Amino acid sequence: MPAVKTQSSVLITGVTGFIAAWAAEYLLEEGYIVYGSVRDETKAKELQDRFSKHGGNFRLVKVSDVREKGAFDEVARKVDGILHIASPFHFNTQDSKKELIEPAVEGTLNLLRAAAQSKTVSRVVITSSFAANMQKFESPHTYTEDDWNTISTEEVEKDNTNAFHGYLASKSEAEKAAWDFVKNERPSFDLSVINPVYVFGPFIHPVKDAKSINTSVGMIHATLNGKEIQDEGPHQNYVDVRDVARAHVRALQNEEAGGRRHITSAGPFGNGQIAAILKKNFPDSKVQEPKKSDCPDFGFPVKSLTADDLKIDYITLEKSIVDTAKALQEKF
Ligand code: NAP
């Protein structure tokens, strides 16, 4: 039996975000009622227009900040499942603890407390990240859901202005806090976690201008527009946003997804490969010849132990990058 059945109600936090908007699209297509939390209701106008074909099934809930005490209490009483996706994802800070880690951890706990008071919520799916798995190994290592990132928290303790480690720590600390909450509080819902690698793909969420595009798509936009890039070989992994959104929906629906982390990854990529795909498909763009460089600290082969349960037939790198670039060109 699915954990959260079609036609029931689901809260998506941060529905105006890149991944969350796609999750809303798929849930609505499958007949769910979606409550989307937004910081700014005016920003959600485009989504309201897009989803108007689903009648009144797309409903907005104003939550100015994920940390706002009690902000999710009322909506949690109306829904059967929750996708908690809202969390800061940027590297634009000098204060990692205050701007990245605190909202991620406090926001997650605030949401879980609301879910624990609800009599209707049976499953909460949290968007963590592969950032919560990444670790530094001396010898080659294949990452699985058994791996946890502990170094980023240590790095932030040494240097709070390090936004890269600040973001990574925000994801590992928030995910750990969620598993601890469930273990200690024993709520009536269970928890499922999605750990996506780098997410590309076309965007349907509202984006005002190129500067405000989400971080991962911003990388394709910059490459397309002539940013100098370094070819470090295939040193990271990618997944398309449509597959990540589908993974969230299936994690709500599949009974066996409860109590598990799921790394969602379609395979490795390198900046040089992205540049080559863009150059081939968009010959008039300003893509630069990548400069050769050494591999970074992290090595990234990934073998998910659980993602097969979500039955994702992953979109290829070429399709993901081409569709991202087309969406960018249509918008800007
Ligand atoms: P995004 O478009 O920047 O989405 C972030 C969302 O979080 C937005 O809806 C944003 O609201 C909301 N948010 C941020 N801080 C908030 C706060 N303090 N209070 C309320 N809402 C807040 O980026 P995304 O890529 O979709 O990221 C969504 C989730 O996926 C994040 O948890 C991120 O860590 C995770 N993730 C992303 C990737 C990737 O490569 N994209 C990979 C792994 C994991 P506004 O719309 O109002 O700005």
Image (cartoon, grey):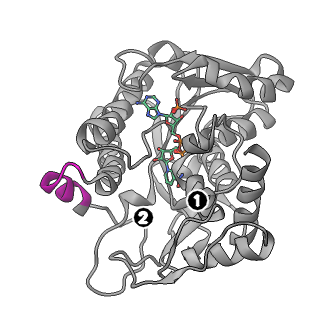
The residue lying toward the viewer, choosing from 76 and 55, is 55
Q: Looking at the picture, which amino acid does disc 1 mark?
A: Ala
Which label is found at residue 324? none
Residue 33 horizontal side relative to residue 269, left or right: right
Secondary structure beneath label 2: loop
Q: Nearer the viewer, mark 1 or mark 2?
A: 1
Q: Position of residue 297 (x, y in %)?
A: 32, 76
Q: Residues within 10 Å of mark 1 (few under 14, many from 20)?
A: some
Q: Position of residue 56 (x, y in %)?
A: 78, 16
Picture layout, residue 20 above or below residue 113? below
Q: Position of residue 176 (x, y in %)?
A: 31, 48
Which label is found at residue 222? 1
Q: Looking at the picture, which amino acid does disc 2 mark?
A: Glu
Q: Position of residue 24 (x, y in %)?
A: 68, 35
The residue lying toward the viewer, choosing from 82 and 228, is 228
| Residue at the image point whose x is 26% and y is 37% from the top | 184
Residue 93 horizontal side relative to residue 316, left or right: left
Estimate the spatial distance between the alpha carbons at disc 1 and disc 2, rounded to whole Å.
31 Å
Image quadrant assignment for residue 66: top left
Dot 1 or dot 2: first in sequence order is: 2
**In this view, which residue lies farthest toward the right?**
53
Picture layout, residue 281 above or below residue 77? below
| Residue at the image point whose x is 38% and y is 45% from the top | 92
Residue 190 horizontal side relative to residue 26, left or right: left
Q: Residues within 10 Å of mark 2 (few under 14, many from 20)?
A: some
Which residue carries the number 2 mark? 145
Residue 109 horizontal side relative to residue 57, left or right: left
Q: Which residues are magenta?
A: 152-161
Q: Is residue 105 part of the magenta span, yes or no?
A: no
| Residue at the image point whose x is 68% and y is 61% from the top | 311
